[in-house]
Amino acid sequence: METSFPRLNEPAPNFLAKTTHGDRSLSDYKGKWLILFSHPADFTPVCTTEFMGFAKAAATFRSMNCELLGLSIDSLFSHLAWTRNIQEKFGVEITFPIIEDIKMEVAKAYGMVHPGAADTQAVRATFFIDPNGILRAMVYYPMSNGRSIDEFVRLLRAMQTSDKNQVATPEGWQPGCDVIIPPPKTSDAAAKRAGEGYKTTDWYFSTKSL
């Protein structure tokens, strides 16, 4: 099976996989956001910090109608031993499922295994899938550096805000900050923009508070 790369704003690749919480498929998450994330291997230091970070933020994600689902090429037995070790040594319970992907079927469908990487290791890839099963964001990190869970919380809030209000969000946006109004698409609309009540810097750049 060749590695493929899914595309944003198209249906996410379907899967049926064994996990530490039983079988899971993409359809199980219909109606919810899903963050699917891969890690190179169990019992590795950087991955351990990431899994603890995801676990500590799990309640926050759940309050935003979002579930978490991890993946690596390791076996279920390895996953179970690792999560038990994290709870014993670090006092953090891993409450979300982890996919066993020994045949690399899910990893290859999502482009998690890159040329030049070890055959048994998936890169640090993170996929945001919306309640309709559409892939909305992809974030890739190198093997050597851990992800920022706070950024994933921020990004999810930003996408949900954009969906709800039909707006965009600026760099570093946080709840309470102004949002960006889509620019006008016609000459007449551009001429009217300054009088529409927004905070307008120029015809193409207007913001408002929510």
Image (cartoon, helix red, strand yellow):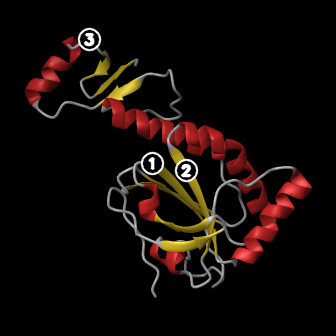
Inter-mark Cα distance, 3 to 2: 38 Å
Q: Nearer the viewer, residue 115 or 107?
A: 107
| Sequence order check, earlier mark of 3 and 1 | 1
Kind of residue at badge 2: Glu
Note whether 41 is above or below 154 in the view shown.
Answer: below
Residue at 37%, 64% (x, y): give it. Answer: 7
Within-10-Å neighbours for mark 2: few <14, some 14–19, many 20+? many
Inter-mark Cα distance, 1 to 2: 7 Å
Kind of residue at badge 3: Gly
Q: Nearer the viewer, residue 89 or 50?
A: 89
Residue at 45%, 48% (x, y): give it. Answer: 32
Residue that lies at the very extreme toward the right in this rendered image? 89
User: x%, y% of residue 3?
Assistant: 47, 80
Query: Mark 3 against mark 2, which lies toward the viewer?
Result: 2
Residue 32 numbered mark, or none: 1
Residue at 91%, 57% (x, y): give it. Answer: 89
**Rendering quarter of residue 134:** bottom left
Q: Is residue 74 left or right of residue 210?
A: right
Residue 175 visible here = yes
Determine contact: label 1, label 2, CB under 8 Å.
yes
Query: Mark 3 against mark 1, which lies toward the viewer?
Result: 1
Residue that lies at the very extreme toward the left in this rendered image? 188
Residue at 66%, 53% (x, y): give it. Answer: 147
Residue that lies at the very extreme toward the front in this rendered image? 22
Kind of residue at badge 1: Lys
Q: Is residue 150 left or right of residue 112?
A: right
| Sequence order check, earlier mark of 1 and 2 | 1
The residue at which mark 3 appears reads as 197
The residue at which mark 2 appears reads as 67
Residue 43 visible here = no
Within-10-Å neighbours for mark 1: few <14, some 14–19, many 20+? some
